[in-house]
């Protein structure tokens, strides 16, 4: 470190603001999605089967694990405890969702998204869902990027 540098440089305000906007968007989306799926795991398991990408034995397990993971990750991002870990988990899920949506588009399968439980029953998988998830991934990156502060610690 050179003599003119201050090791306590505060994070630029714009980065903090963008980070908080990302955190709020990510938390809202994933809590909404997770709760919707958790309220009706049977329907979500059927939605998972419709993607034709997973073995039968995984459907019920994923119907419980995915929404719980979404909710826990969203809460971590929102409250700041293990924020970056939560963002990595949600980013990984979102990348998997993008891959699944792309595979459905490429294979020409017509199915309901199941992304938000019963509230998305009429939402057919297509380019809109793919672009929406790419936008969500941008929000996750925004939530991840600001450095940790003392009140937002991962220790």
Image (tube, grey):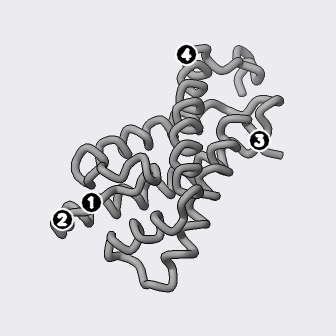
Disc with the residue nearer the chain's start (4 vs 2): 4
Please tell me whether mark 3 or mark 4 is closer to you in this view.
Answer: 3
The residue labelled by disc 3 is 81
Q: Position of residue 18 (x, y in %)?
A: 53, 23
Q: Secondary structure at mark 1?
A: helix
Place residue 102 in its image quadrant: bottom left
Is label 4 in a helix, a strand or a loop? helix
Residue under label 1 = 102
Question: Nearer the N terminus, badge 3 or badge 1?
Answer: 3
Distance CA(mark 2)–CA(mark 3): 38 Å
Closer to the chain start, of discs 1 and 4, is 4
In the rendered view, tell whether residue 45 sits above or below residue 81.
below
Q: Which residue is mark 2?
A: 106
C-beta proximity under 8 Å, tags 3 and 1: no
Q: Secondary structure at mark 2?
A: helix
4 or 2: mark nearer the eye:
2
Viewed as shown, does residue 102 lie left or right of 152? left
Pointer 4: what residue? 14
Marks 4 and 2 close (CB-CB < 8 Å): no
């Amino acid at each position: 470190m050179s003599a003119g540098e201050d090791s306590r440089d505060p994070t630029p305000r714009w980065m903090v603001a963008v980070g908080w906007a990302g955190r709020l968007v990510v938390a809202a989306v994933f809590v909404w999605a997770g709760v919707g799926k958790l309220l009706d795991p049977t329907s979500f398991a059927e939605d998972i089967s419709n993607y034709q990408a997973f073995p039968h034995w995984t459907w019920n397990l994923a119907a419980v694990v995915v929404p719980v993971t979404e909710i826990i990750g969203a809460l971590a991002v929102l409250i700041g405890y293990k924020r970056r870990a939560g963002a990595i988990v949600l980013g990984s899920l979102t990348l998997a969702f993008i891959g699944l949506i792309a595979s459905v588009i490429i294979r020409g399968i017509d199915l309901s998204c199941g992304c938000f439980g019963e509230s998305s029953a009429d939402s057919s998988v297509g380019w809109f869902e793919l672009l929406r998830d790419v936008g969500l991934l941008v929000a996750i990156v925004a939530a991840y990027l600001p450095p940790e502060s003392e009140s937002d610690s991962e220790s």
